[in-house]
Image (cartoon, rainbow, N blue to C red):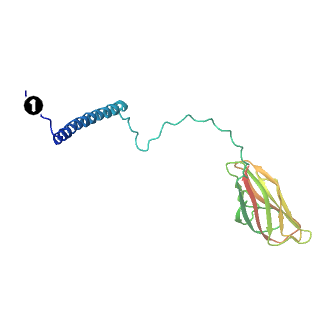
Amino acid sequence: MSKFVRPSPALLIAMLALFVAIGGSGFAAGHTGGRSKLTAAKAKAKRGPRGHRGPRGFPGSRGLAGPQGQQGPAGTNGANGSPASSAVLGRGVDVPMGIWFLAPSGQLKPSSNENDVSSFTPDAPVKVSDLAVSLAVAPGPGQSRTFTIRAGNQDTPVSCTVPEGNSVCTTRKSITLAPFVLISLGSTTTGAPSNTDVRFGWRASAG
């Protein structure tokens, strides 16, 4: 019968160290591999499949417009403007006493024949007003000069009289004349005033 040989303490310690080294490495490797597999499984479970990317709009494009709102209430009408008007100016040269006719505008010697100096109204109704007359020589005592807008060889209400000792007369009266009407300025006198130049003006506006 063989005799049992007890291993020495140094041998036992060496064997124990070898066992721990071998067993620990396997344990770590087993646990490390399991942890990696578990982490990958969790990541795969949380992340779903990636969908397709939608189409992109054109640069600067806008979305669809919304429905149009209701129309607001109409505003109040503004005040009417004043009718278009113009000043008509003229001058009669060396107008003597008696009945004479002057052109309704411009500078011209008077005529005893109205048709020689008359003009036509435009192709629209025209309002004649605000006649003003100025004389170079004022009428003397007992003398006067009357000036009248005439239409169709007839006197109109647009008339003013320069009395003795004065050189100016005005009137605010007006009349609306039809298109294509003969128009002139008539001059009449009382007494025997001296010849004089006559400056005048009147307003023409839309009738």
- Relative side of 108 to 194, left or right: left
The relative height of residue 52 versus residue 138 in the rendered view (above or below) is above
Q: Is residue 143 left or right of residue 124?
A: right
Q: Which residue is mark 1?
A: 3
Q: Is residue 20 placed above or below 112 in the rendered structure? A: above
The quarter of the picture where residue 187 lies is bottom right
Total numbered labels placed on residues in the image: 1
Residue drawn at the location 12% of the way across and 34% of the way down: 5
Quadrant for residue 28, please give it: top left
Inspect this view and state whether residue 113 appears: no
Q: Is residue 31 left or right of residue 75?
A: left
Q: Residues within 10 Å of mark 1 (few under 14, many from 20)?
A: few
* Residue depicted at 32% across the width and 34% down the height: 39
Q: Position of residue 173 (x, y in %)?
A: 83, 55
Q: Residue furthest right?
A: 142
**Front in this rendered view, residue 69 or 31:** 31
Q: Nearer the viewer, residue 98 or 137?
A: 137
- Asked whether residue 202 is in view, the answer is yes
* Left or right: 68, with 191 as reference point: left
**Quadrant (top left, top right, bottom left, bottom right) of the N terminus:** top left
User: Which of the two residues, 68 or 203, is positioned nearer the viewer here?
Assistant: 68
In the displayed image of the protein, which residue is found farthest to the top?
A: 1
Residue 152: x and y in percent read 76, 51
Of 132 and 188, nearer the camera is 132
Q: Callout 1, which amino acid?
A: Lys
Where is residue 164? Give x, y as percent. 89, 69
Secondary structure under the numbered disc 1 in the rendered image: loop
Q: Percent x, y for residue 51?
A: 36, 32
